[in-house]
Image (cartoon, rainbow, N blue to C red):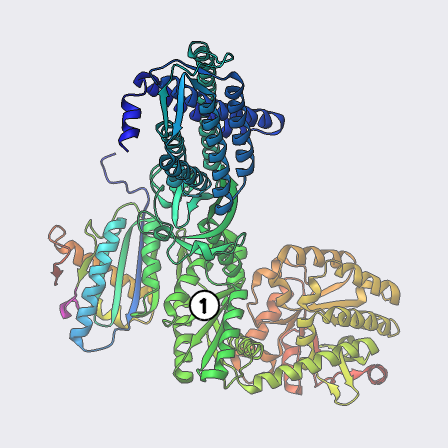
Amino acid sequence: MTEPDHTDLFRLVYRSRSAIGGDAEEVHRQVDKILTVSRSRNGQAGVTGALMFTGLFFVQALEGPATAVEAAFDRICCDLRHTGIEVVECGPVLEPAFGEWSMSHLVPTADAGALLNRVEHDTELADAAVAAMKLMIALIRFEPHAIGPTRQLVV
Amino acid sequence: MQSVYTCLTQAHDHQLIVLAAGICIVGVYGSFSVATHAARSEGRSATLWAGASIVASGCTAWATHMIGLLAFRPGMPAGFDPYLTALSLLTAIAGIGVSVSLAIGQRRRTQRFLIGLLLGGSIGALHYLGEASYVVAGAVTWDPLLLAVSIPTSLLMFGMAMVVTGERRRDLRRTGAPLLVAAIGVLHFGGMTAMTLTFDPAILLPSQAVPPDVIAPIVAGVSLGLLILAVVGLRLTLNARAQARRDQERLRELANLAVEGLAVCDGEMIKIGNRSLERLVGVGAGALSGRRLSDLLPGLVVSTLPEREEREADLIGADGQRVSVRVLRNEVPLGSGRQTVLAVRDQRERLQTESQMRTLAYSDGLTGLPNRARFHDLLTRHAASYGVDDRTFAILVLDLDRFKLVNDTLGHGLGDTLLCKVAQRLIKALGERDMVARLGGDEFAILQVDPVGPEAVEALAARIVELIGRPFLIDGQLVNIGASVGAALAPADGTETSALLRNADLALYKAKADGKGTFRRFEPVLDARVQARRGLEVDLRRAIAVQEFELHYQPLVDARTGRITAAEALVRWRHPERGLVSPADFIPLAEETGLIGPLGQWVLRTACLQAARWPSHIRVAVNLSPVQFRDLSLAETVKAALAASGLAADRLELEITEGVLLADEERTMATLTRLRAAGVGISMDDFGTGYSSLSYLRRFPFNKLKVDQSFVRQLPGDPESAAIVRAIITMGTCLGMTITVEGVETAEQFAFTAASGCDQVQGYHISRPLPVTEFLSFVEAREAA
């Protein structure tokens, strides 16, 4: 029983639109704050995942025990700093896709190109979601062991 | 004074003096302890012990005196007159007896002093009678000065002794016995010294004089008796003390059993506190004795506390914590006197229970939010204070869209969890001073305090709609609901609680009617609409009672032959003031209020009755509302209408809409099957709009499809509509159903539908709905043609 138990692994991915006001610096500060709180809270509850902020949208993946993910999602849905929450994926999974870190922060650059464009502009949720997931997993896989809790990965 | 000293040192036998003193002390102790026992005893034994005490005191005085005389060494033959000796003893006993019985219960000092003088006098009498009984072979002379000093002095001392023994103060009382002994000493030695004996051989001892050798054993016997009495007294005293100790112990145990804290107080000082009080204060056993009450109960003055009346107070525990208590003062006889007993009752549990009860009464058990009662309470307070400080407030009421569906399909357990999560999100939407309550079911209400204009109310409502509209994740399932919000602002939309709540509710209805997931603020027009509706409802009830309805019939003709094959019965309301009221205006209201039941029955019965008189090839079609389908006895009602009218079952068609099928499918299916079995035809009305699930056609036993008139309106110019109508006709025909096209208004439309293979046509092109007599004329004319 030393192996991590993934029998109760649950994943939820959502997309939402940022409602943070102010200039770029203020937005940056707020996102950092969100990450800090998210890491400390989710870390304690055994929730891992990734948060991607495109400047307009958040895409966040939460992985962990079903009850912990539910609690984390409850908190997220009480937050007024974003709107239009749409769940992209929700259900039990066998393997974690977003690593073992508490909450990776992914900052896509313009080079992410077409995928990023689709995350932001696809009106069809399903399409945008697929794009977001692909982008996130690509970002994670790029250098899977180098992603530290504070390091921002740029592609 | 020199002579007194010589008298003591030379004229007396020292050992006997010591013995006299010892007997005196023993006797006094014995008498006092026996007297104390007499005081403790009751009835006969009290009298006996008191008598023994008095006799003992007399004997003590006498024996002391006699030993003193025996100790006197006059240096010449001496003897005792037996009669006088006996008299002296009797005098002593009588004098002491009288004085003591007078002294009992005597509180006034002067009286006691006088009694003391009496006692002194009787002791004095004993002494001088005794001296008179002491006869020597010589002359007796007296020193008058010494007598004049010693007798009054000793009398004064006796008086003082009696005064102090009756005092309240214990230390003063204790000086009584030594003072008495000293008084006796002064009397005795003063008297002895004042007496000078001169040897005179000429004076012979009287013949009856008894020599000291004979008197001494008698005195010794009395002394022994006193000694025994003293031992008895000691024994009694020890017993009494042990008893007192036992009593006190028992009392303490009893006090420790009490749940209440008890403190026996001496003024401001605690003498004893029981275990409960020690626990309450938080100190060890016995630690309360000697503490000041004001340290424990600051601000409470015990002496001003009315007896037997509970007072609220705060007790300061050893840890400095305040404990709410109630204090009761009681003056009770305890042991020797009345004492102040303070009962201290811990109020924490009661207060906690009360607060719990209050919480239960004013909060919702599921979500923990305030409940309806609490909300109304708060609202009333706000409405009342509005008149004082003119602060605005708003009421927002909301209910959850699709909650019933979630609850019914996913279970009540999940529904309850959902309500808790909704409560959490609502709290997040609120401003700092706003309050949210659960009114019941999926109904919530919010009191918004001091909104800055209607925009602030709208912003709050928008936050609520946003937060509740987000997905909920419960037990791995995503649940989507929404919130409809209605609001009323004080004072613009009313200041009375009831008016505000009603107006907010009206706004909520409007929000729901306008498509849910939205916010509406109250407007006066809503109220007007409600008033109009209420008026209509009253009218409708009356109309059903007095039967202001009539049926009109719209013919359906065979598309190929043009013959009338059926007629659809349509209800009309002939209002005495408004004239004919359209069904669109009253059927929805009748459905909402349940009046559709009696109205529908009337339509069914009337249609059957009238159709029974028509030519037998013309059938009648009656519309049934989804609400009528909720009635389990619908099939029986239809059969009864048929039986009453004599109409053949196959001449009746019942038209239903999709709404009927959406509700309880199984029950609807059973009712439809029963109707079909009875031979009644079933038509699907308005086909092509709504969901129009094709599976309905497979599952339900329809005879006929009626193509919705919205497709016909565009015919034949619109190719899409034409294609749809043609497709429905083909599909229906293939399924073996009769096809009716409704709303045919032009000859072109009629030609198109006929060419497309439709069976029946209905519409203004044929005829508008006609009153029954006109309809019959129309049929006649048509048949004749």
Residue B660 or residue B599, whichever sits in front: B599
Q: Which residue is mark 1?
A: B436
Q: Is residue A28 above or below residue B225?
A: below
- The picture places residue B702, in percent across and down from the top left corner, at 68, 62
Q: Residues within 10 Å of mark 1 (few under 14, many from 20)?
A: many
At 46% from the left edge and 19% from the top edge, which residue is drawn?
B226
Q: Is residue A112 magenta?
A: yes
Confirm whether residue B240 shows in the render. no
- The picture places residue A81, in percent across and down from the top left corner, at 29, 70
Report in which chain the residue with disc 1 lies.
B
Q: Is residue B50 above or below residue B384?
A: above
Quadrant in the picture for residue B645: bottom right
Q: Is residue B421 above or below residue B292?
A: below
Kind of residue at disc 1: Val
Residue B378 or residue B714, whichever sits in front: B378
- The picture places residue B278, in percent across and down from the top left corner, at 38, 41
- Span highlighted in magenta in the image: A107-113
Q: Quadrant of the N terminus of chain B?
A: top left
